[in-house]
Amino acid sequence: MRTIAAASLMLAAPAVGAQTSVDDDEEEFHDELIHSDVPLYGGEDGLVPEHFSDGDSFGCMSRVALGDWSVKRSDMPEDDDPEWLRLGNYGVFHCAIVESKAYSRDELGASGYRYSFFVKVGATNVDGKPTELWVLQSGTRPGSDYLLLARPAADEIIKAFDLLQSECPAANRRSGPEMDIWSSDYCAINSQRELLALAKEMAKRRPLAKLTFVGEAEEQDADEPADQAAEAAVEPAPTAE
């Protein structure tokens, strides 16, 4: 029987936390962390990647290209280095993205990971053009984090997204105690309706960053295993089927 690990029918995303501002006469960019108590989207909501079975073939397929993605912020100088997002495939029986983030591409193989999914959550018009609204739902427990994404409506394999800003409605903002340089604030969004409303509002603004597919993940040296302890404590590593 032939199996397919990943079919490309053919995202460190920006560090989220405190708001980032530029000069007073320029636009202020917002990148607050969006978090839900439990994942907002499940299999019935069109998670990507998805399972397929066709005769003697089966596996997982994704509309979003899997591999390494660069993350270039709109409020940074053009010659600044991007951040990086690696999207791997979990396996052929259970479909999920293995998501890693890092400040440089060569650090991706040694960073922690989470199990994540893309979801197309709606559509809107931006400057009169049809625009798809997506999210990257990262992690499964406790709850999930979200990146708000947008792209022109089209059927081709997805190799680019606009990463939208995330300015939290005041009623949804949670603030913890002061902890030196580390922020404990986040945006609590606990319904699909609220998340879609926020995405539509953020789509009206200049994107926070551009996510661009660069290519397949670079091969990792066999004697330098990735350090995945950060997530392994709450989400077990993949096991052989």
Image (cartoon, rainbow, N blue to C red):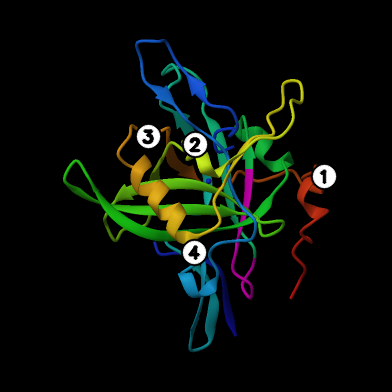
Residue bearing mark 1: 223
Q: Earlier in the sequence, mark 3 or mark 4?
A: 4
Determine the secondary structure under disc 3.
loop
Mark pair 1, 3: CA separation: 40 Å
The disc at residue 70 is 2
Mark pair 4, 2: CA separation: 20 Å
**CB within 8 Å, label 3 to label 4:** no
Residue bearing mark 4: 48
For label 1, count other residues whose C-alpha is less than 10 Å away and answer few (under 14), some (14-19) or many (20+): few
Mark pair 1, 2: CA separation: 26 Å
Image quadrant holding the C terminus, namely bottom right
Q: Position of residue 25 (x, y in %)?
A: 35, 10
Tell me the residue at 67%/52% (across/down).
114
Residue bearing mark 3: 207
Mark pair 4, 1: CA separation: 32 Å
Amino acid type shown at disc 3 = Pro
Mark pair 3, 2: CA separation: 15 Å
Q: Position of residue 7 (x, y in %)?
A: 48, 66
Q: Earlier in the sequence, mark 4 or mark 2?
A: 4
